Every structure is written in C-alpha cells, then in structure tokens.
Amino acid sequence: MSFHKSVRGPNEVHLGPTSSDIEGKLQGGSHYDKKSFVQVGLWWCVFVSLHLFCCIYFTTMWWGYWNLPGTSLDVWLYFYNLGLGTDNEHTIALMHGCLALIHAGYLLWMIGWSLKKRRLVLAVYNVFTRPATRARRKGGRLKYYISCIYYTIFSRYGLIGVDGPYFDLVLFCREVVETALQTQQAYRMSLLLPRTQLNRGYVALLVLNCWSTALVHSVFHRSATKRRFYTIVCDCVLDLVTSVGISTVLIYIYSRDFNVARNEFPLYKWYEDIWVVHAISEFQLLLVTTWGDLAMRMVFSLSMLSNMNNMKKFLTAKRELKMVHTNKSRLRNTSILPQKVGQPGGKTIHKRRLQLLLSAESKLTHVLFFVWGTVVLVLHLHAESISGLPQCQMQVKPWFSIRPSCSLLVLDCYRSKLVGAADEITAQWNDFDPKTPACVAIRHCPRLEMPPILTQFSRLKVLKLYNSTITSWNESAAILQTNHPSLIMLFLVRVNMPNGELPVGLQGDELPHSLSDIEFCVTNLRTLPDDFDLKWPQFASIYFEASNLTEVPESLARLAPYDLSLALNPISSIPAKIFDGDIRYLHVGGTRISELPKTVRGVSHTLKLRVDNTNISFFWDWIDPVIANSGTTHSDVPPILAANSPYCSDLQRIYEGTLSNFTAPHYDGQSVRLSNVSVKNLAQLKRTVSCDAKTATAYPLEHEDALSAVVFS
C-alpha cells in the first residue's frame, strides 16, 4: 500500500491509505460486491471445512491424551521415553481441548450469523462499538478503554490490522519466526522420519512457501491488499500442514492397527522391527515430547487461526452505507499540505523514514525468502543423493549427513552368506554413520562374534538377536551405559550362548540405565551370575522363557523386577522373595511347580499371576488381598491365569455341576476366597481366575517366527 501525508489541522500529520485506495474501495462498495455468490460460497465452505477439520483433530487429540493414563500404550510410551509422562497427559489434553473449543466457537459463529443474516457471513468483527466520549461519561470506562485498544491496534485499520500501516512489518517478522520454526521442523523430520514421501512433501511445501512469499511481494508490490492476502494464504497452508496435517497423516497410518475400545496397539506390534522403528521415530512428531515442543505446536496452531482471521477480514463485506458516507466525508476533508523545499517538517521526515523502511523490508523479503527456500531445497537434495545400503531396511536422510544413515539395521547371515565373524560384520557396518541406528537385528548367524563396532552405536534403542549361536561376545563389544545410553530393549530369541551362560558382553559393571525390557526366549541359558543384581537394571521387565534354568537364582530375586517371566523352564519351586517388592506380573506357566510359597509378605495388590500348564491345585491366603483388589480396578485381565492346571480342571467341573468341591486337600492358611465354591462366590471366581488357554510365552514367539524365519528363494 502506498502512503502519503494528509492533514487534519495545521500541524497534524498522519499516515494512511492514498485517496485512490479509498476511492477504489468506495467505488467497489465491498469485497463481496466484486465477487460472485459462487466465490463467496466457496470461501465460506473453505473456512467452515477448515474449522470443522481442526475441531475434529484437536478433539481427537484431547480424547487420546485424556484416556491415555493407565493403558498399556502409556506403559510402552514410558518404556521408549516418548512424551512428557503420565502426570502431564491431562495438561496436554486440556491444551488441545482449548484449541478444539476455539475452532468450534468460530464454526458456530459463522453458521449462526449466516442463519441470522440469511446470507453467508464469514465473520463479524464489530464486537465493540466505536469509542465515544459520552460512553465514558456514562460510566462505561472499562468498555471505553477496551474499545479504544481494539480499534487502535486490532481493528482493520489499526496499527497491526490487515489495512494498518505496520501490518507488513508485523507480517514480515512473523514470517521470519515461523519459517525458522518450520525449517527446524523439516530438519527434525529428516532426522526422524524414514517415510520419504512425508519428508519430500513437507520440504516441497516449505520451499514453495518461501518462494511464493518472494513471488507475491514481487508481483503485487503495487497492491498492498493482494500482496498481504496471498502471503497470508501461503502462510496459512503451511501452518495447517505443520500443526495438523502431518499428525493427521500419522494418525491415519497408525489407526489401522489401533484398538479404540482398549485404547492400545496389539502387543505383537511392539516386537515388529519395522513397525517399532517407525513408532519410535514418528511418535516424536505425533506426540508432545517436551514443553518446548508443546509451545511450538501452540504457536503454529494460533498462527493458523490468526491467518484465517486475517483472510476473513480481507474478504469480509462492508455493506453499511453509513460507513461508506463516513469514509467519503473523511476523504473530502483530507488535504495535501505542500512542503517548502529545503524545510522538511519532523513528521515528514518520519514518514519518509517509514517509507524507506517499508521499501527495504519488501526488497529484503524478496531476497531473504528466495535464498531461504533455495538453501532448504539444496540441503534436502543433498540428503536425497546419498545412496542406500542393502542392510539398511529403513533409512533416514539427515540434511547435513555425508554418509548413509540407517534407522533399522538388519544383518541376515543366511541372506548375506556370512557365518557371523567379527570382521565380516565390521565390513558391512563400516559403510554408514554408526550414530544413526535405532534398532539392530541380527539373524541366522551360526557362529556369531559380536564386533567392537557395536559400541559406536550410541543412539541404539533396540537390539535383537534371532536364531543365532553366540561364540564370542567380549568386553570390547559390551553393552554399557557409556556406549549405549539410550538402549531400551534387548531381545535374544532362539539363541545359544557359550556354556549356557550369559556372554561377557552382557555382564558389564553398568548396563544402560534406560534398559527397561530384557527378554530371552528359547535359549540354552542355565544359570545366572551371583552378582547379577548388581549389574542389571532394577524394576525392569525381565523374561527368561523356554530356557534351561532349574532354579530361580537368588540374584534374580534380589533384582526385584517389575515384570518377570520364567515360563517353560524346568523350575520346581519359586522363592518367596520373588513376590516381595513391587512386582506386577509373574509368569511361571509351563514350569514344574505344584505349589506357591506358603508365606509371602508385601505382595502387590495389582499382581497378575500366570500358573497355567502347572500342577497348582490350590492357593495360599496371601493371594486374598490381590483377589479383593481385583474388583476395584478397571482392568479386564483377571489377576490369575491357571489354564490346564488341576485347580482349573476342578473349577471347570464345579461350573458344570459335575463336582461339588475341589479335590485337593485343604490346608491351614489356604485361600478362603479361592476355595469357596458357594453359589454366592462363584461370580467372584469367574471374575478373578481365568481358565482360558493363552500362548505359552509372554514373548510373541509365533509372530516373531513368521516375520524373521529364513526365507528360501
């Protein structure tokens, strides 16, 4: 918009639209008068659709966060350190709920006023009457001041209004800040997202937004209204994609696997290499991970609302004839005051300085955003030019990387025709950046020697060995806090170890503090070190399933795991110390035990106990608090699973009416709740004891075999 000097009095000079600008608006009457009803209807539908879409999105996020605490999904997010934690999830939900209410308010506002006016109304902004001195005299001081502030700053011709003198400067500063944040988001996506389509799409939008800003300023440099409008449209599109679009695509991708009724993903999904690497990376974009991340999301969301608001102001009709006459009278009373050459006034100098500033801002905008977009495009194309590797099943493309970056590294000795020697593995792992793998899977190696290069994988989160025989895993390749500070999951499935003992590489003085899930399934492990509890993490999930343990080592009992499975081991007794502390899940199904410890102190009231496929025929009374607590929780998992045991055999016959009582002898200290077969107590027995058969191991072995088995070509 061009500027001139107008005079209301001898010494009063102000900046405003030129007379030609005002005459153009008066002759046009209104923005709607120039547009057909179809165009107005199209814009109205666009804004209604955007508000409806955003309202649904933020409502979905509110519902998800509000119902997240206490679910198994929340536990997995805690394991992988994704999010701000259970204590803050309701706060995040409320923030998203507020945004949903704002969009719902705009939606109802547009529809309500359209019905009231009997025409399509984009917005009504005259919520405050123009400030008048008599209003102040009548006692409406607060309303008077609010009106003054609104019309001075936020109205259409206010300081930062869409037709205000400083709107271009405000828009320029906001564009710089937003583009910087969006560039940082694009860089994060290059680090985290293995899905190239999402990366390319977002970078393309970012580059086009930068170039369109320069193009719009160049093409419409003589028309402030068009320049501002189309710049805002471009910004709004990118804000929409940044705040809502990417997350919506990810929600759609994961919704196919999500169980809405249980608010969780199927358990086996968390053991799929490709799926879990996608989840680890993409949940950092889908979920709020830091307070700074939450603040940035709010900035983009509110910026999108502001852009939509400004677009409505540009498109809003001004049909009031009184306003038109007022503008005409102002135009007639405006005169041009000539200046004497060589005697510029102070306000004239201020006006010229502002014009120079606006001109410099326009030129800077052309150059800055064109160069900005070009730099982003060059960085992205450089990252795309780095070739992939066959052992990298999932590859990311960081902008500043000069070597291939591998999110999921799979070493298949059978397919690669290797035996698993350290030098063979090192030769394959030397070709990519060792700081990038999030998951390493080693399969089908008949003589596996763990190479020292493993210690360079500092960002490793998941390490899985499948169908391999370890011949050497020395200290030079040890799993330690200093080497792998981010390691969370360690899986050994169908693995043989030297002499049935833990490899030296898993007996370091300090395993990673983040290691919270350790699962051995179908191994030849027969013993554990005596100082096992001093080296491995406490309060973790530890599974030693289908192995050769004949007894429960004292060191394992002292370790006090949160989640423990000893299924399918030839164990005949369980020490009482295992139940002490805060253990929440114990699986001893498929073992040789016929009786649980008689005396247990301090058992967790939320314990889930699996004794299926054992010779258990009764329970001691220390289990009664667990049974009593089962009625106070919302879990649909019974506290005891005893399928294919003598206890369940009797219980099934009691349900059928062919047996009147349990066949096992009654002992002092036996559980009354689980021995009472009266009609009144049968309902509690059905609620607390499950006799339905489950898979023998907690680890989804069959699913793993289907995914990782040797593929014969």
Image (cartoon, rainbow, N blue to C red):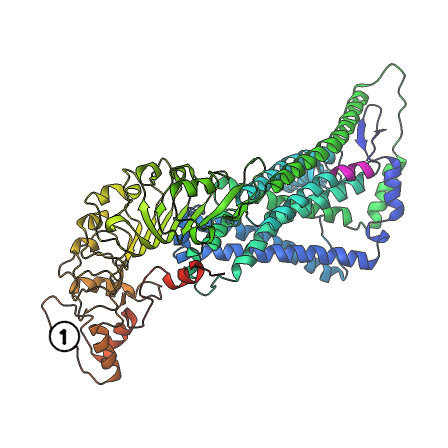
Relative to the observer, which residue lies in front, 339 or 294? 294
Q: Residue furthest left?
A: 668
Q: SS at mark 1? A: loop
Relative to the observer, which residue lies in front, 387 or 16? 387
Look at label 1 and name its amino acid.
Answer: Ala
Relative to the observer, which residue lies in front, 705 or 217? 705
Q: Is residue 708 left or right of residue 681?
A: right
Residue 335: x, y in percent? 89, 30
Q: Is residue 459 left or right of residue 504?
A: right
Which residues, given as a range, are shown in magenta? 213-220
What is the quadrant of residue 357 in the picture?
top right
* Residue 291 seen by the camera: yes
The residue at 77%/30% (across/down) is: 363
* Residue 109 seen by the camera: no
Look at the image and say whether residue 237 sits in the magenta stretch: no
Residue 278: x, y in percent? 50, 51
The residue at 71%/56% (across/down) is: 46
Rendered view: 479 above or below 647: above
Q: Residue furthest bottom?
A: 658
Relative to the observer, which residue lies in front, 412 or 195? 412
Residue 63: x, y in percent? 50, 57
Q: Is residue 292 left or right of residue 147?
A: left
Q: Main secondary structure of the magenta part?
A: helix
Give the class, few, some or many, for how many residues have Cα within 10 Å of label 1's Cα (few <14, many ≥20): few
Question: What residue does disc 1 label?
Answer: 664
Rendered view: 186 above or below 669: above
What is the quadrant of residue 175 in the picture?
top right
Rendered view: 458 above or below 99: above
